[in-house]
């Protein structure tokens, strides 16, 4: 074993960073044996220097993260600050001063992954970010390395624990969205401002990262179609149950029909109870991968939390540490396929549409005609009438999002259609 230690700087010592530091200390001997050199915590950058941080030598703590990454003697910089700046500038500076980087920062990777990979490559350093998608679940490395010889066609995942907790509550207790969100907040599963989770921003960042790796193509956050789950109602769950389905907020990355393009999207969707993702409960995450040769794979586990996320960070630290010692670098960005990202209108799937209509003869035929005019084929229709009003639930065969959008627009103009109560995509069949 090499006796000169690998010097590691920790940028951020919050939920994740404090666990990274703890495991680095408590597992120091094992980490040294696995890497082939001891690991030394050389500095810890934070915002509030006076906060008591258990197990951290106060002499290592600094508020000057830039000076820390410019030291020039660092082997690895672990970025667990989050957000775009100063994380982006710090990572770039770390590469310029000879360090490799391990990051958990999905927002930054989704927005600027290509530039960061380019900086890593320019300086002959590693950029690893297993913790950026689905916390502890090994997913980036399996996609980047284990499946590098296969052709991935689809990635379908529950990649946000907060929203899965809320939807699971609604499903199992019949609660409405607000009630389930309040419980998630009280239990610490949702932040005081839950926007990033419930509006799908967090899942969209992960979808961009996953699609890019799976399809060897650059997919940016702006390329991901995003819809949140705040409009999902108890009535939607009742409809889903009648279809033998449940509702999940899904990140879906797939090759489009002819394989010449890809799509990436995040939205709530019905999935059959028989699909493995339907049984992912509480705040757990799971990602279902379909590939040519391997077939169907499912990755499951805790998608967040200090220790689980630190597990993924430490795994990267070991891999990057080994690379430093052998003088190698791991896989960089693979974007050679450069497939175009198709707009949402070209996505083809099935739909569950719930309409409030007048309860009188001919309405069903009128509605069916609108679907036919837009080339959307109906699979099943269910009608319930009461006091002159009725609800009509239509489930379609596969159709493009653009065709379905046109259908709904025309339906809204019909006198007999009082309103479109819900539109939900049906996935995983
Ligand atoms: N939490 C999770 O479960 C989870 C899961 C997967 C990925 N991640 C990712 O991991 C990263 C960190 O998340 P977290 O939950 O650990 O965040 P956090 O608890 O808010 O911790 C952020 C840390 O960064 C420090 N910091 C903030 N601004 C700084 C600056 N300008 N210079 C130096 N230090 C600064 C903070 O210092 P103070 O301690 O002084 O405030 C704190 O120690 C994010 O990218 C997040 O997306 C988190």
Image (spheres, helix red, strand yellow):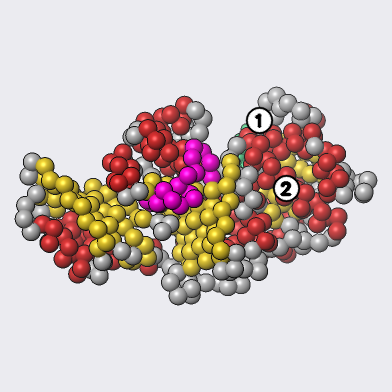
Please tell me the numbered disc located at residue 48. Answer: 1
Comparing 271 with 256, the one in front is 271
User: Does mark 2 have its CB less than 8 Å from ligand 1?
Assistant: no
Q: Return the x and y of residue 272 as percentages of the image width and height.
A: 40, 51
Q: Which residue is mark 2?
A: 315
Q: Residue at x 80, y 37 (%)?
A: 27
Q: Is residue 322 left or right of residue 147?
A: right
Q: Is mark 1 within 8 Å of ligand 1?
A: yes
Q: Answer few, some or many: residues within 10 Å of disc 2's Cα (few below 14, many 20 plus, some between 14 and 19).
A: some
Tell me the residue at 33%/44% (across/down): 241
Vertical placement of 118 versus 280: above or below?
below
Start and end of the magenta stretch? 269-285
Kind of element beneath mark 2:
helix
Residue 25 at x, y = what percent?
80, 34
| Residue 136 rendering spot, x and y as whole percentages | 63, 44
Cα gap from disc 2 to disc 1, whole angstroms = 28 Å
User: Of marks 2 and 1, which one's residue comes earlier in the chain?
Assistant: 1
């Amino acid at each position: 074993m090499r006796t000169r230690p690998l010097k590691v700087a920790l940028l951020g010592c919050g939920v994740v960073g404090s666990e990274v530091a703890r495991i680095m200390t408590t597992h120091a001997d094992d980490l040294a044996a696995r890497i082939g050199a001891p690991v030394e915590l050389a500095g810890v950058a934070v915002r509030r220097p006076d906060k008591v941080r258990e197990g951290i030598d106060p002499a290592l703590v600094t508020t000057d993260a830039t000076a820390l990454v410019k030291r020039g003697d660092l082997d690895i910089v672990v970025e667990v600050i989050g957000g775009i700046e100063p994380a982006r500038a710090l990572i770039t500076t770390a590469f310029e001063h000879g360090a490799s980087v391990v990051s958990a920062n999905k927002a930054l990777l989704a927005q600027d992954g290509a530039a960061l990979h380019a900086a890593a490559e320019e300086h002959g350093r590693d950029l690893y970010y297993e913790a950026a998608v689905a916390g502890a679940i090994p997913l980036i490395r399996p996609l980047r390395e284990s499946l590098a010889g296969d052709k991935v066609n689809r990635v379908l995942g529950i990649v946000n624990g907060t929203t899965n907790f809320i939807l699971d509550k609604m499903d199992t207790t019949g609660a409405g969205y607000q009630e389930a969100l309040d419980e998630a907040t009280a239990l610490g599963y949702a932040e005081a401002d839950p926007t990033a989770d419930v509006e799908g921003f967090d899942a969209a960042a992960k979808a961009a990262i996953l699609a890019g790796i799976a399809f060897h193509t650059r997919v940016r956050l702006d390329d991901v179609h995003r819809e949140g789950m705040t409009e999902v109602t108890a009535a939607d769950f009742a409809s889903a149950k009648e279809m033998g389905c449940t509702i999940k907020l899904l990140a879906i990355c797939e090759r489009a029909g002819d394989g010449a393009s890809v799509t990436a999207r995040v939205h709530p969707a019905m999935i059959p109870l028989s699909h493995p993702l339907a049984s992912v409960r509480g705040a757990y995450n799971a990602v279902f991968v379909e590939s040519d040769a391997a077939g169907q794979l499912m990755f499951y586990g805790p998608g967040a939390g200090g220790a689980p996320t630190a597990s993924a960070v430490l795994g990267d630290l070991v891999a990057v540490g080994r690379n430093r010692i052998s003088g190698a670098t791991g896989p960089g960005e693979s974007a050679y396929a450069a497939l175009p990202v198709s707009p949402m209108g070209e996505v083809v799937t099935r739909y569950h549409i719930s309409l409030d209509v007048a309860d009188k003869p001919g309405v069903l035929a009128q509605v069916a005609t609108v679907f036919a005019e837009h080339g959307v084929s109906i699979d099943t229709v269910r009608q319930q009438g009461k006091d002159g009003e009725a609800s009509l639930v239509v489930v379609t065969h596969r159709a493009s999002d653009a065709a379905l959008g046109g259908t709904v627009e025309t339906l809204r103009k019909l006198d007999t259609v009082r309103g479109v109560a819900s539109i939900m995509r049906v996935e995983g069949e």
